[in-house]
Amino acid sequence: MDAEVVLKEEDMDGSWILLSWLASCLMVFGGALPYVPQYQDIQRSSNSEGFSTRVCLVLLIANILRIFFWIGKQFELTLLLQSVVMIITMFAMLHLCCTVQNTNRVSTKQHRLSDLDFHYFWKWSAFEDYLLFCFGFTVLCALITLLLLDSAVFVEALGSLAVMFEAMLGLPQLLQNFYNSSTKGMSVKMVLLWTAGDVFKTTYFVMNESPAQFWVCGLVQIIIDVAILLQVLFYSQDTRVKLG
């Protein structure tokens, strides 16, 4: 009887390890999945107008800051890997948007980072400018973190800043939909996956006792996701077509 109990406990431990591993993999790569349908929509239509590239800006800043937060306060390695995957994903989205916009551009006028024109901030014509901006931002963060790494207040503030930016993930898309009075060109599947992913990761944060900044961020993201889905219902005359 005792042997059977031990075997059952070992089976349960093995199952728990497997589920934990699957959850970690989903956390690492799940954040990038919502952008697959949006990427495919832009490729298919050769039009990126419905997708706000400022979503990429928000996520790039948030995840760069999160990496430096990890250096100061080493939380789960899973969340660090998630940030790396998300940064790569955002660069892929920006590269596609730049390619499509340059192909469709009628005017030969180019907007570059070197122009220092704030009106065209994050509306540059060349993908290299986005890389250069992120490189400069990363170097700046590295220098500040190197100087203040021993300050617990700075490290906690860095973490709060990182999750504050991440919590605003859907806000650029929400505002763009509002200004356009339309959700045309935006992948509804992307937003549905955002919502599912945010619910999952918020639960993950709570269950794994991650720093409070993370689950608060998740709650804010869920609220914004729901607001965008309400926009889809409000602006679309035929929601079934949008969902397709």
Image (cartoon, helix red, strand yellow):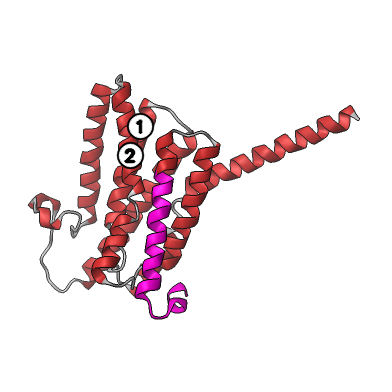
Q: Which residue does the numbered mark 1 point to in the structure image?
A: 69
Mark 2 closeness class: few <14, some 14–19, many ≥20 residues within 10 Å: many
Q: Amino acid at mark 1?
A: Phe
Answer with mark 1 or mark 2, whichever residue precedes in sequence. 1
**Looking at the picture, does residue 148 appear above or below residue 78?**
above
Depth check, front residue: 182 or 102 = 182
The residue under the point 27% across, 72% down is 181
Q: Is residue 238 magenta?
A: yes
Within the magenta stretch, is there residue 78? no
Task: Say few, some or many: other residues with alpha carbon within 10 Å of mark 1 (under 14 / 14 to 19 / 20 or more).
Answer: many
Q: Is residue 23 visible?
A: yes
Is residue 85 shown to the viewer in this render?
A: no
Residue 63 placement, left or right of 240: left
Taking the view exactly as shown, the residue that stands out farthest to the top is 150
Pick the front one: 104 or 178: 178
Amino acid type at circle 2 is: Ala
Label 2 sits on residue? 162
